[in-house]
Structures are given as structure tokens and as C-alpha cells.
Amino acid sequence: MTNYLSRLFYLGDDYHGSQYQPGLATVQGELIDALTSWSRESHSTQTVQLSGRTDRGVHSIGQLAMIITENQFNIDKINRYLPDDIILWASTKAPPNFSPRHSVLMRHYRYYLDKSWTDLNLEISKKAAALLIGSNDFFELAKPDGGRNTTTTILNISISFHNNGYFLDIFGTRFLWKLVRKIVTLLTEIGAERIKLESIENILSGHQVFKSGIQPAPPENLVLMETIVPVQMKPSKYAIRLIQKQLYNQLEQYRRSIRTVSNVIDHFSRPMMTYQHSTNSRNQPDF
């Protein structure tokens, strides 16, 4: 049996997160099924391991999968058995004793911020982001996860503007459940000046700032950009073209949906027509 590493692209809209859950559609579950069909071997979460989990609706460019198989590894052939929105795009043999979770040096997430950020006080949001950098107990910014240690290290956070929109990049050694999305909510509230910058110190000291807790921002804007490991992988040009095609198709579908929704809104914005029922309704179908 040989251990292989592969980069994994997926769109998370139709999946209950990346981690395998019996009876639910997940990224890991689809990968297990595809590898079983391709290899004619029996695969499970033991032979198909991910470097971390992402929530329902979160996307990935740089998720890392370790796959154990006796077959000659070929991601282009495996991709034939995967749904269009899950694609393996680079691979190599894993180094000896490699752990997909514990051998990772750093993870990079990007959150695409909504249009409301054009009206925020960006300078104070950036100051708040800088205060989160370092090793801290992020208990107030994470969802409870079975007693898991909530102290971790954020290496850097930046807020940037590109292509008519803002996005937040966050780099860390280990990410807690919903940490990135709760940070987005926190920075939004501070930038909107609904809470003070000093709240960061209170949060990192374990004090509750929001009465009902900090609600995570929507998952659809979050992308796992890269899982950084000391290993070089060989990309597949064909797989990358598949990713580009999938993204273009998604964009066109989004544009069609926007046009449809706009037309429906326009329809309901017009004065409603008055429908007169025929006085002779005996022969009219009753819907």
C-alpha cells in the first residue's frame, strides 16, 4: 500500500461539510465512493483522510487529501468518478510518517466580504484584525467542539481590495470550528462602530461581548485557499481546466439566476392585474 497526497478543489454548496457523515452528502464521502469505484478496493475514512474539515457551504482550492491505495495513483482517472464540483488537481507520494493533519505547517483561508464593507471604517477594522494576531485563547470566537483546546495561533490577517470587492486573508497553524466566520462578524461589527475596538481585549480574556454569542458570517463566502506542507506536488493541466470550466459554469448559472430574480422582482413591482372570474363557471376547471 502506498500513501499519496493530493490537492482537492470543491464547491461546498451541495455538501454537509467536508468530513464524512453517514447518510449525508459530504466531500470525503464522495471521494471515498469515487476511489472505491476507480480502484476496486474497499475505501473508508482510514484510507481517505483530509487535512482538516470545512463547514457546510465552505469551498476549497487547497484542501489536502491523503489516499492509501495499491493502485498506480492517477487523479485524472479518479476525477471521472467524482461529481463535477469535486476535483483532484495535483498529487505526489507522501513522505514517510506524514500525517495530513499534524504535518501541516500553515493554513490559509480567504473570506470574500460583502458590499456593506464599502461603508465601514476600514482603518479600525484593520486595527482590530492586528490585535487578533498571535497565540491566544479564542474560546469566544469558536463553536464548542467536544472539549477541544481553543488556544491557537493566528500568524497574520489582512484586509484587501481587488476586483471591486474586499476580502479577508487569514493565516494560522490550526483553525477552530467557525473561527474565521466569527472573526468576520467581529471585524464587521467593529468597522460599523457598533462595538468598540477595546472589545478585542475583552474577548481574548474570555469575556462575553455579545449577549447571544458571536454569530458566524455566512459560509458561502469562505474558501480554504491552501494547506501548506513541505511537499511539492505535480499539477494536472487537464484537472485545472476542469476546475476553470466548473467555475465558469457556476458563474453563468449565477448570472442567469440573477436575471431571473430581477425579472420576478420587476413583475411584482408592477400594479397587480385584476382577474375577473367568469359568471358562468360551471364548465370551468377547478384548480
Image: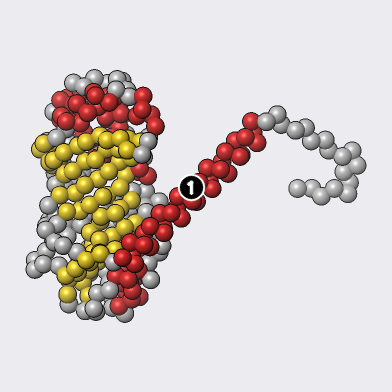
Q: Quadrant of the rendered structure where residue 102 is? A: bottom left
Q: Type of residue at label 1?
A: Tyr
Q: Is residue 217 visible?
A: no
Residue 261 quadrant:
top right
Helix, strand, or loop for circle 1?
helix
48, above or below 275, in the image: below
Please name the residue shown 24% across and 79% down the image.
71
Residue closer to the observer: 214 or 97: 97
Q: Point out residue 191 in the picture as x, y percentages from the top left corner.
A: 29, 24
Q: Position of residue 113 (x, y in %)?
A: 34, 36
**What residue do we see at 17% from left, 77% from top?**
1
In the displayed structure image, the side of residue 282 where residue 125 appears, left or right: left
Residue 85, by quadrant, is bottom left
- Disc 1: CA contacts within 10 A as few (<14), some (14-19) or many (>=20): few
Nearer-the-camera pick, 182 or 161? 161
In this image, 53 relative to 255: left or right? left
Q: In the rendered image, which residue does mark 1 sit on?
A: 254
Instruction: Check the image and report above or below for 101 versus 282.
Output: below
Tell me where residue 118 appears, x and y as whole percent.
Answer: 36, 27
